[in-house]
Amino acid sequence: MLKVNFAEIKRKELATAKLKKMTLDAVHAHQLFDAKSMSNLTHGLNEETRSQLLRLDESGPLRRLMIVPDDYLAKCRELEDRFPNFSGYINDYLLPSLALAHVRKASLQLQPTVFVGSPGVGKTLFVSALAEMFYLDIERVNLETAQASMELVGTARGWSNAQPGMLFRWLVRSEFANGICVLEELDKADDKNARNPIVYSLLQLLEPTTSRTFCDLSIPDLKLDLSKINFLFTANTLDGLPPAVLSRVMTFEVPDLTPSQAKNVAVRQYEDMVKDLKLPAGAPILTQEGLTLLSSESPRRQRLLLQLAIGSAVYKQSKELVIQKANKPKKGIGFVI
């Protein structure tokens, strides 16, 4: 009587499925790690770290690379229309990189760049829109926090509560290797009194030779190739930025919006809000008077004022938005918009 070895059949099915995962187009795929190096790595790991490592193994060593689409120029022009104060970056930095990659049919790679500008000028909003426009995964880390280094690269294996950092977790769940990692508040990152200064981690990630052999502190024996990640930074000022980091990135100073540009941005933000909120027909109108008030505000503050005005108009069943600028309280505790 013929005996069927179901365990062996299942093993072969899993092996075949894994092989299919690994047969991506070599031109548009990136090897994140060596599959052979995964053996015996779970020994001595706590439950959380072991779980993340097993998930990485299940996802396979290859990640897709997002390539530059044929309509990249139209996408850039749309970005420029939405963010006119980023026109210099789009035309002098972004478009040349995309054009070169498109000709080579290569993956979408951006030069590490620090966006420097006053608070609320739209730095993070622009980077988020850039990622959305080109279908790139995006992750954000605030470098101002005291635990920024551990949040980014994990906790050392010797700690009882050691766990992988954000970069490791992101790549576990991400299908692509060339997403955008936004590191915010770079000007507040150089804490010389910190036990694990974030600057050391940034230097490793920004240097091509070392980024190809990145090790999360919780799993130091596993080398990950992070060289395809697009690292972008935000900062309010260039003062105090670590010179070693600045030597490895480009900087773009984001100008404040002109009144005319601010009006156009306000109109776009209002239209997007009406669409996102799915307001019924006859949504409250943004008047010229309201636009004039918004023309002197940053994109961030425009959003806040528009949200309040739309909510107030819906509540009062008004046909027009009333943009009100809150005054700072002279005494006591209050809220400033």
Image: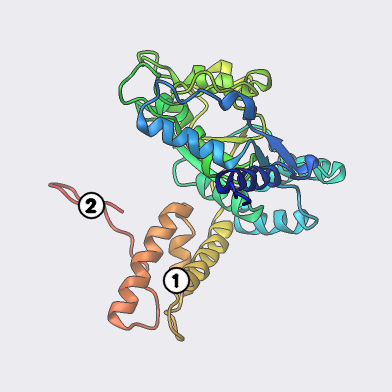
**In the drawing, does residue 337 fall left or right of residue 231?**
left
Q: Is residue 178 visible?
A: yes
Number of residues whose C-alpha sits closer than 10 Å to that of mark 1, classed few (under 14), some (14–19) or many (20 or more): few
Q: Closest to the observer: 169 or 39?
A: 39
Residue depicted at 83% across the width and 41% down the height = 100
**In the drawing, does residue 164 fall left or right of residue 35?**
left
Quarter of the figure that contains the C terminus: bottom left
Q: Is residue 254 visible?
A: no
Label 1 sits on residue: 289
Residue depicted at 47% across the width and 65% down the height = 292
The residue furthest left is 332
Task: Kindly state the secondary structure of the residue where label 1 is placed.
Answer: helix
- Look at the picture and state if 168 lies above or below 149: below
The kind of residue on which mark 2 rests is Phe
- Look at the picture and state if 305 lies above or below 65: below
Q: Residue 137, percent across and down?
A: 58, 47
Residue depicted at 57% across the width and 19% down the height = 203
Q: Residue 42, percent across and down?
A: 46, 26
- Look at the picture and state if 91 lies above or below 213: below
Coloration of the structure image: rainbow
Q: Residue 145, percent across and down?
A: 36, 30
Numbered badge on residue 335: 2
Number of residues whose C-alpha sits closer than 10 Å to that of mark 2, classed few (under 14), some (14–19) or many (20 or more): few
The residue furthest right is 103
Q: Earlier in the sequence, mark 2 or mark 1?
A: 1
Residue depicted at 86% across the width and 41% down the height = 104
The kind of residue on which mark 1 rests is Glu
Task: Kindly state the secondary structure of the residue where label 2 is placed.
Answer: loop
